[in-house]
Amino acid sequence: MPKTNVKLINQGSNVILDNGLVRLTIVKPQGLLTGIKYGGMDNLLDSKSGETSRGLRGSEYSTIHQSNDQLEVSFRSSYDASTTSTRQVPLSVDLRYILRSGVSGFHCYAIYERPPGCRAFDLVQTRMVFKLQQDKFHYMAITDDKQRIMPMPEDILPSRSKQLIVPESVLLTNPINPDLKGEVDDKYQYSMDNKDGGLHGWISSAPVIGFWVIFPSHEFRNGGPTKQNLTVHVGPACLAMFHGTHYIGTDLLTQFEQGETWRKVFGPFFVYLNSTPDVSKAHNLWIDAKKQRLYEMSAWPYNFVSSPYYLSAEERGSVSGRLFVQDRFVSNSLIPAKTAYVGLSAARTEGSWQLESKDYQFWVRTDSNGNFTIRNVIPGAYGLHGWVPGFIGDYLDQKLVTISAGLQRQLGDLIYVPLRDGPTVWEIGFPDRTSRGFYVPNVNPMYVNKLFLNSPEKFRQYGLWDRYTDIHPEFDQNFTIGINDPKKDWFFAHVARRGANKYLPTIWKINFNLNSVADGVYKLRLAVASANRSDLLVHVNHMDTEHLVFQVMNLGSDNAVCRHGIHGLYRLLNVDIAPSNLVKGDNSIFLTQARGGDALCGILYDYLRLEAPGKAVKVPDLRVLHNAEGADAEHGGVTPLH
């Protein structure tokens, strides 16, 4: 873009940032962004939105950086820990806006801090939301395949829609756009995993303008790469989610104790604006936005952020290694952990990175040989976590990884040994931490969202829990190993059945044959992709107390079933089955969803496996075997970053 000097204009209660392409109007000292002028439109934002529900507000305004090339302004609210009021959130928040010369957009970030002496507090959710002109922005895009004309805000009001069982879901009965009549709208249908997202937005008409939220990094977002977040919804609203509990629930609450101090930088993220005079080329704005996201990712960490709490590339470090899987019942050799997820997190137990919110996380995928390099890591001591598609459970290295500024730590070769007691008797599904590999039914024609017809994400449709009853109106799912196909015969969600007056418990039966029964304990592995208010009982061969081998009550608060998800918080349940419970010949395992009266309780299984008894085998320490390649005695070698 041609460069023009950036201007800072104080105009009464507003401060204006203008680079000749974009003009921002911000209320001071509160920090409320009330105007975005761009591309011939005086204000991209909805000027009718009230200011009473805009969340945290600053009380101190200051200019952090001012030059011809860049402006950075601050709107800070400072918490007084001596106050006795419980109405004020016990956080100091510094909201920053950055506008640069020649840049078609602006950057936002926020510094959250708990000074000494703060009262105890649970942080549930924090985000920035941009509500756009509702008479201009009708078309949204979140992926190449997920793009559509959206309903108007009036369409979800009672006069034009019907409220469904899920509070956020409505059936459009009389929408302004008649083409949308009979469709279901729910903001959760447009959720994205962190690992799959990073770009979403809207395109306006007359003039044709694109408004895009770009995350160049997810390091500051809680819950790791599989955390699901909202993106866009009717409003038209464009969200920048920093921190939330969606699809995991109360387990992901960030709990601060009395007096606990804390600081975290959320962002920066980038609001990118583009336009075209040719309406036939409106789709090119999405293509251009994808290119811009790649540029923002390549520029991360940014070199123009003024806060000392946001670290530059020179102040960060990196770590490299190679991950193998050892499963002697799959291969006699070590298996390269290809396309595995490997990450650094403050979490210290296996899988607990899913619940980590206070600190930063840094994740990458391995190559086909299991190699990985995690770059631009903030210095500190981390747990090295991972998970490998095709294998159950979570990897956690035995030693912490210390990252230092300007250095690359080399870990050498690492081994993940998934839980395994013996050879596989049978398995159902494929372990990828979702229930995608099972049968997802077609939507009831009464509750269609056309975006997800003939889509690989058909699970996003509304009301699929009730389709179980349509398929199994009287008798529950009965699955026989070697005969039934999980992709056709195993319903993706273990839910309750719709009865005449209430929802009823369901019992799923797995039939299998044993040529003989070995001495020793058999192991049933239940990899759970999500659970919500579920009471799970496991019986072997008989439904009585003596044959009850496992139970867990009120499992999960993920809400993935009603929020149209395919996964939530991953759990691995391990069930011991004594040989006395099994017989030579035909056997059955019963999985009971014992909670009734709840339409939205359910378990999404990822993978099930029965193992015969086996012997443990000692795992070699490859860091010793490969010491000649550079792994030191502590935990890997260290080389300078260039």
Image (spheres, rainbow, N blue to C red):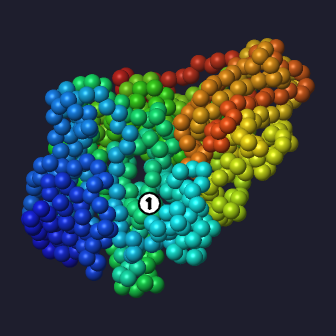
Residue that appears at 53% across and 76% down: 177
* Relative height, residue 26 to residue 634 (above, below): below
Task: Report which residue position mark 1 lands on.
Answer: 232
- Of 221 and 545, the residue lying toward us: 545
Q: Position of residue 153 (x, y in %)?
A: 45, 66
Q: In which quarter of the image is residue 372?
A: top left
Q: Is residue 16 left or right of residue 299?
A: left
Residue that appears at 20% across and 55% down: 31
Q: In this view, does 92 lie to the left or right of 235?
A: left
Residue that appears at 39% across and 75% down: 135
Q: Quadrant of residue 384?
A: top left
Residue that appears at 49% across and 63% down: 157
- Of 483 and 544, the residue lying toward us: 544
Question: Regarding mark 1 in the picture, which secondary structure is present there?
Answer: strand
Q: Where is residue 204 in the image (x, y as percent from the top left)?
A: 40, 75
Q: Most extreme residue toward the right, as rendered?
A: 585
- Of 517 and 237, the residue lying toward us: 237
Can I make out residue 29 in this image? yes
Identified by mark 1, the residue type is Val
Q: In this view, does 369 lie to the left or right of 20?
A: right
* Relative height, residue 459 to residue 628 (above, below): below
Q: Where is residue 308 in the image (x, y as percent from the top left)?
A: 16, 44
